[in-house]
Amino acid sequence: MRGWALRAWRGGWRRGQATVAGEAQQREKPPWRVLFFGTDAFAAQTLGALHAARDPGPRLLVDHLEVVTLPSQLPAGLPVKNYADQLQLPVHLWPDVGSCEHFDVGVVASFGHLLSEDLILKFPYGVLNVHPSYLPRWRGPAPIVHTVLNGDAVAGVTIMQIRPKRFDVGPIVQQERLDVPASCSSKELESLLSKLGANLLIAVLQNLPECLRNKREQPKEGVTFAPKVTVAMSCIQWEEQTPEQILRMHRALGVTMPLQTLWMGTTVKLLDFVEVETVPDLTDRLVTENRTIPGSVSYHKQSQMLVIRCKDGWVGAKAIVFKKKLSAADFYNGYLHPWFQQNSKMPLEECRFQTLKLATAKKSLKGGAALHVHNTQQY
């Protein structure tokens, strides 16, 4: 194999880079020796595909596989660590990566830590990243969440080659688009993209040298960023957000981080959001009852849901967490019934949902009121 081709494969950012230790043992075709970096369920899907590629036979693709993951304080542990243990694969806990000289290529999926240039250069074919967006759209730690939040009709997966010092800026090796199903949640989209990404990685590994020769730089146009998910993102802004925006928030965040608001000065969480557009005559009735102030709430008995005013419309919720989980009917009987409205000492304007400000959200976290959040983050 010619030296100039090797240097191109090993990153392209240091032309003429001196050869690294172990290059003499580099393979020119499968099977590959792979060091995998990952943490969550998205990454576990990729790990499963790499493990399946170890099946012996004439088309053996991977003959040695080890795993690098993060230490975890979660009682259940991280999905990649649990899966690797189940598969009886060697596991290294970051920043320990073991000896890298005997690997051909590194693979990263949802790892969350930058790899140093020295580490990347230990792999003759560099390090590939399975990133769940159609780059340069949604660079950063939470592309799936932001795809749903933004209402994108198209998502995708990119196999890119990692460069040091910055996330998601390396050259594209392979890409594939995916039409986002209607009303798709981030968890559902993660499942679709994880399978697509795992299959795409295997296709790249089947012809790795040629794929790397044909890699291309990312376009400068169309770059967007998907910052880390925070608790503040779950706070509904009744005066500023439309029903569609709130429903997208629920689909993007609701599985791991219920949407939050204020009721009578207390942080509450709304669950099981639904559209109200299809309920006959409901909006006309709400206008007649003057439920047009953002955050005003009423109970719709026929559909057993709370109906809440937001910008340019209403949104429904089937349940609420207020001290404990309550159905919409229970919340109505306890806090919206005319008897409560007449006997409550709270001003009438306080008997509606109000936007939870960031400072209030931080205070709730310190007080232990907020749920533990495990973000769906991809790198």
Image (cartoon, helix red, strand yellow):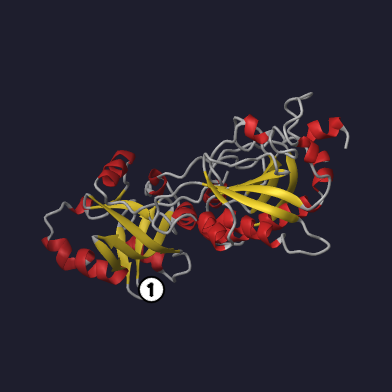
Which residue extends farthest right? 2
For the N terminus, the quadrant is top right
Question: Can residue 378 be seen here?
Answer: yes
Residue occupying image coordinates x 21% and y 52%: 264
Q: Dividing the picture into quarters, in which one does residue 63 lie?
A: bottom right
Q: Quadrant of the rendered structure where residue 338 is? A: bottom left
Residue 289, can we see it? no
Q: Quadrant of residue 114?
A: top right
Q: Residue furthest bottom?
A: 302
Locate residue 233 relative to residue 166 in the image: left or right: left
**Residue type at mark 1?**
Ser
Left or right placement of residue 33 versus residue 235 in this view: right
Disc 1 crowd, CA 10 A, few/some/many (<14, 14-19, 20+):
few
- The answer to whether 92 is drawn above or below residue 343 in the figure is above
Residue 328, relative to residue 161: is it above or below?
Answer: below
Labels in figure, total:
1
Towards the viewer: 264 or 48? 48
Answer above or below: position of 283 versus 40. Answer: below
Q: Nearer the viewer, residue 173 or 124?
A: 124
Q: Nearer the viewer, residue 319 or 193?
A: 193
Please, what secondary structure does the residue beneath circle 1 have?
A: loop
Residue beneath label 1, please?
A: 303
User: Position of 144 compared to 289: left or right?
Assistant: right
The percent position of residue 362, horizontal first and vertical second, equals 30, 41
Residue 219: x and y in percent read: 72, 35
Image quadrant in which the C terminus is located? top right
Which residue: 44% across, 65% down? 276
- Choose between 163 and 19: the one closer to the eye: 19
Q: In the image, residue 210 lies at what x, y percent?
A: 84, 44
x, y (%) of residue 48?
63, 60
Q: Residue at x 77, y 56 (%)?
A: 61
